[in-house]
Every structure is written in C-alpha cells, then in structure tokens.
Image: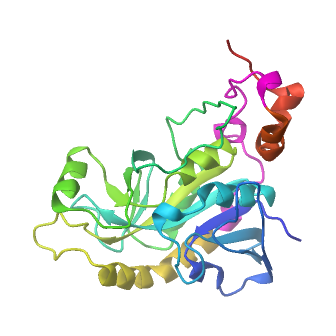
Amino acid sequence: MSEAKIGIIGGSGLYKMEGMTGVEKVKVSTPLGEPSDAIILGNLEGARVAFLPRHGEGHRISPSELPAKANIYALKSLGVERIISVCAVGSLKEEIEPLDVVIPDQLIDATKGRGSTFFTDGIVGHISFAEPFCPVLSQILFEASKKVGTKVHKGGTYLVMEGPQLSTRAESQLYRSWGADVIGMTALPEAKLAREAEICYATLAFVTDYDCWHPTYESVTTEMILANLHKSIDTVKRILKLLLPSIPQMRDCACASALKDAIATETEYIAKEKRKELGLLIGKYLSGEGNVSQA
C-alpha cells in the first residue's frame, strides 16, 4: 500500500529501523520536480510511515539545494498528514548542551533566496504562521522524548541559516543577542511549505555542538557534528518508536485547515495550468468549499 499518514524527514539511516515491516521503496514524481530521493514506506509500531532522506541517500544534496517543494508535495501525494522533521542543530544557549534534544516552537528565517511558498506565478496565498510548528504534534514528540530518558527542552527558537558554511563567531553572537536557542539549516522552507499543504509539522532537533560562540569549546567542525549525530541516532529511533502509537487518528489543530481563508486570488484569475499543478493542495477550495476572493 503506497500511502501513509505520517512522514519522517531526516537522515537516510532512520528508515533502517528494527521491527519495520512491509517495506517498499517508492519513486514519486511531482509537478514541482523530483524529491530528494525515493520515499521508503513501512509499518512501524502499528503505523504506516513514509521516510524521506532529506539530503538524499549518501547525503549528497546541500541545504541550499534541497527540493523542498517537491519533498512536501510528494509526501502530501502519499496521504501524509503529519511530518516529523529530524535534524541536527548547534546550541546558542549554555544550558542546551551537545546531545540534548530540543522541540522548538518558534523560527527565525535567516536564509537567502530559498523558494518558500507554493503560491507563485499567478496565485497568492497568505497562511497564518505565527505558530510555525504544530502544537499537538510537538507535545507528543516532547512526551516521547521524556520517556526515553534523554534531556529534552520543550520550546525554543530555531534560527535557520543559509549555509552550507557554518557561522562566523560574530554571526553566532548576533544570533544569541536575538534570543535564538538553536541554529540549523533545514527547518525552512519545510515548515512554511508544510503549513501551506495543511500538513502538521514538528521538529526533533538534536544538538551536536555549541556553534562557535562558546569560549571554552573548540570551534565546531563537520567531524564533531557527524560524531555526535552518530551518537544520537539510537536515541532518535527510540523516540520515534514511542511517538508513533501516541499520534491520534483525527486532527483538530489549525494546521489541517490552514488554507481555508488564505487564498486571495479570485478563482477566475487562476490559470488552468496552475490549478492543475496545485490541485492536490487547493482543489477543495477552488470547488467553492473554502475559496475566499479579495479585492
């Protein structure tokens, strides 16, 4: 069965979990291009799950080059209603230590030029994004993290930088002055696109380093990040296995109807090609069930 209601975006090692059955590899094409890689579907802890390796198997796609629109569209086309994003971050706070887990609740966008909306080329949509992560899914993720015994921080601001270079010390200090808690390269535009696709989105961020601001730690290196990433992978797998049975079948959060009053373009002005391209996302509203026209 090539469908799933739960999607997990992260490293390619995440879908190699003990106990997963009914595994199939699905190559999905979208009107917005090819996703990062084939999607792995399988049954885990009673749930059908779709795993997407964010950077492609073998980690071959840079954060700035990720086909985020195609990734979110592909998961939506498989029936995904909730996405758990697993990512590595650097800490900008003393109390958030390497190997800790953070479930962020806010974002700062410091990326440059990434396509962050499906609504372009003749159609305008304005979603609410004050709360960028699904509060329901984030709470379930937090509870599962506590149960495995890892040190977990509920809430926090995730600053998304462009990369692929790591921060300068001046940048790291600037981001700390803004009140950011962790820094990474992948939560955006994923979170924005997921909201536009009416998919719940929450992040499991595991801390690999102190970025480069900390006076008593050596400067962060790729070797350090990968070493701590490897140490965290078993913890992440245990969290995901505990999480899956706790996810309710029904959704009652605002994510599920994020587009209800968001489409500003009058239906008659939306080109047929655009309606076809975005039909998966907007079709139910263009049929008169929720489209709002504004002058």
Q: Quadrant of the N terminus?
A: bottom right
Q: With 127 as the anchor, is 265 left or right in this view? A: right
Q: Main secondary structure of the magenta part?
A: loop
Q: Is residue 52 above or below residue 159?
A: below
Magenta-span inclusion, residue 242: no
The location of residue 219, given as percent across then percent down, is 19, 74
Which residues make up the magenta segment? 244-270
* Quadrant hosting residue 141: bottom right
Q: Quadrant of residue 21?
A: bottom right
Q: Position of residue 180 (x, y in %)?
A: 30, 49
Q: Nearer the viewer, residue 125 or 242?
A: 125
- The number of numbered badges drawn on the structure is 0
In front: 241, or 126? 126
Asked whether 248 or 6 is in front, the reply is: 6
Q: Is residue 139 above or below residue 254?
A: below
Q: Is residue 27 visible?
A: yes
Residue 235 location (% of width, % of height): 49, 78
Q: Residue 94 versus residue 113: which sits nearer the camera? A: 113
